[in-house]
Amino acid sequence: MTEFVLVPGAWHGGWWYDPVVEALTARGHRARAVTLAGLADTAEEHLVTLETHIDQVAALITGPVVLVGHSYGGMVVTAVADRVPHLVQALVMLDADVPDDGDSCWSLAPPAIRDSLIEGAGDDGLTVAPLPFFDDRARPHPLATLIQRVYLTGAWRQVPEKVFAAATDTPGGPQAPASTAKVRDDPAWRYEEWPTSHNVLRDGPDRVVGLLLSLAVAARSATR
């Protein structure tokens, strides 16, 4: 059995990974999809920052795990891996932000996305509204999590398997161009290009599930 912790992108809850969790569980693995603080249906009064999300996910890691992050979720899983690299068997970035020390989701975003975040935060100044075409379950995303810098020691680079899946069919262009350029030719990364949009589950879960199952086999072999 391999344990997976899956972190969604901004505006989305753990429900985004439901078909992936179902498929992994059916094959005998343990998969936990996280709804980050501030994204649940119930109102939360405290200020939610990037550090809040990092603490939340780090608290779930008690043994060997494969960490999966989509989009903004890459910020979170990288920071968690930086804290406990010895427990992370693989780090999987699904068209996600791959930060260096001092980066933020804001600093890594293309100008058009930066503009959309400011526009989306205009109603209350605290959260960024979901885009109109998102799933009805999408929630306003805490603005502070997208602005706060991440602080990394670099220990996350010790993770033995690092995979980046770049979505090549996203309307408007790549959503994580800085991260894609960073890892594309880096031998420490397994880099793949997928003919899908930034919503890598657009065509169903099979592509993501196949990748994660291949890592489960590798992780099991490495522990024998």
Image: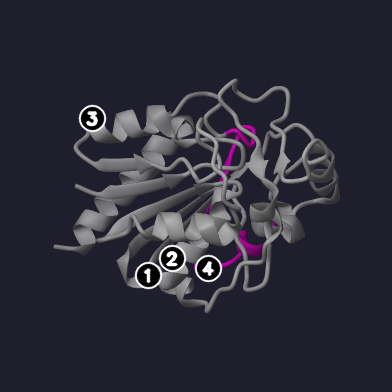
Say which amino acid is labelled 4: Pro
Separation (CA) of disc 2 from disc 1: 5 Å
Horizontal and vertical percent position of residue 205:
44, 29
Mark 4 vs 3, N-terminal side: 3
| Residue assigned mark 4 | 187
Mark 2 against mark 4, which lies toward the viewer? 2
Query: Cβ–Cβ below 8 Å for labels 2 and 3?
Result: no
Mark 2 vs 4, N-terminal side: 2
Residue that lies at the very extreme toward the left in this rendered image: 224
Mark 4 vs 1, N-terminal side: 1
Q: Residue at x 62, y 73 (%)?
A: 101
The range drawn in magenta is 181-199
Q: Residue at x 80, y 35 (%)?
A: 123
| Residue assigned mark 3 | 26
The relative height of residue 107 versus residue 115 in the rendered view (above or below) is: below
| Residue assigned mark 1 | 84
Separation (CA) of disc 2 from disc 3: 26 Å
Separation (CA) of disc 4 from disc 1: 22 Å
Query: Cβ–Cβ below 8 Å for labels 4 and 3?
Result: no
Q: Residues within 10 Å of mark 1 (few under 14, many from 20)?
A: some
Q: Which mark is residue 81?
A: 2
Q: Residues within 10 Å of mark 3 (few under 14, many from 20)?
A: few
Q: Residues within 10 Å of mark 4 (few under 14, many from 20)?
A: few
